[in-house]
Image: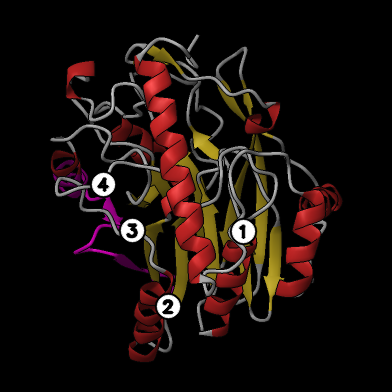
Amino acid sequence: MSLVFVGDIAYPYDGAIDINQLKGYFNNSTLIGNLEGPIIDTPTIEKAVKPHNYNLYSTNEVISLLNEVGVASVSVANNHFCDFETEHNKTLTSLQNSQIDYFGITDKRWSTIKVSGVDCAFYGTYTFITGGNKGKHCPLNEFHSERAIQEIASFKRAHPDTFITVFIHWGYELAAYPQPADREWARKIIDLGADAVVGHHPHVVQGVEYYKDGIIAYSLGNFVLPQVNYLDKKLKYSSPKVLEELALEISPDKKGKAKLHFFRYDLAANRVDAENLNQEQINSRVAELTPFQGLSDKEYQAWFKRHQQKSRYPTYSSYNDKTNVRVNNSYIKLLKLVRKILINTNIRNPYQ
């Protein structure tokens, strides 16, 4: 029995995407995924908190999908789970009634299960730069670096033999490389005793690094996220890199042993296909995705400056640099406000 981590999941209507190749692919495995949005009976634009944004969701058929592919627990700590103000509590109840565990909310940050006789725990959180709807109605576990470090370190002290994975929604959409602050933080968490750090949100696959006795997968990309209509907006991405997907398989009773599975979303056929790469091909692909492997935190900051994609968004150098974080957060808030005004006044329409 193994653990398999998969990326973003949304299923807006029955038959929205062909997943036949995923059924049975991970037999005898326990899957952990990111449920990107709430489960809604009848989604309408009137229920959306921010109608000018993409609002992702799944209908009740997603429960069958999760069961068919073997998902045992989902993180709900992401920027779309609270897109609809009154639906998140119904979603948690629906998951619970279907024997699918969840984590990543303020009063349930962890999920724990036993795999191959090993206790496994998953900590869910999401970072500010991923966006999302906050406020009293939204119970998600928002990332705060020092608090998360304390909570994970405390859990490790109380459960020294548990296999710990941090399952985190972070980074910019379509970014090829992790933010320096995220990479530094992930390594620190491994230093504190976590066994794996697994990221999602960018919708593209990012690099994978072994660090000491742990493994870091910076972004798995999507898993089941069809590019179809969500309410009145067609989901589409400008980069073909979103078509590549990654699943990370780990045997918790054999620390450090991991297997990577690459998938591809066939946009024309609206189907997820297994790529069935051999080990040499997998190693080559990981090397392409992780040209910074082995660099120190300081070396990576310099490397990132030379290789990052051009972007209007700022770079987070370190969560220890409070000024950098505060200034960047304020700038991102301003960009979002400008975007909202442009869309609401019909000056800009990103959904055409």
Q: Is residue 114 magenta?
A: yes
Point out residue 252 in the picture as x, y percentages from the top left corner.
Answer: 52, 72
Q: Nearer the viewer, residue 146 or 2?
A: 146
In this rendering, is residue 222 above or below 349? below
Residue underneath mark 1: 217
In this rendering, is residue 187 above or below 259? below
Point out residue 126 in the picture as x, y percentages from the top left corner.
Answer: 40, 55
Mark yes or no: residue 351 visible: yes
Give the class, few, some or many, for how many residues have Cα within 10 Å of label 1's Cα (few <14, many ≥20).
many
Tell which circle, 2 or 3, labels the residue nearer the N-terminal end: 3
Residue underneath mark 3: 142
Task: Please give left or right for residue 38 compared with residue 42 in the image.
Answer: right
User: Would you say the residues marked 4 and 1 are in contact, meaning their CB atoms lie under 8 Å apart?
Assistant: no
Point out residue 230 in the picture as x, y percentages from the top left corner.
Answer: 37, 18
In this rendering, is residue 211 above or below 68? below
Q: Nearer the viewer, mark 1 or mark 2?
A: 2
Q: Is residue 287 magenta?
A: no
Residue 149, disc = 2
Residue underneath mark 4: 134
Residue at disc 1, secondary structure: strand
Tell which circle, 1 or 2, labels the residue nearer the N-terminal end: 2
Task: Please give left or right for residue 126 compared with residue 198 in the image.
Answer: left
Tell which circle, 3 or 4, labels the residue nearer the N-terminal end: 4
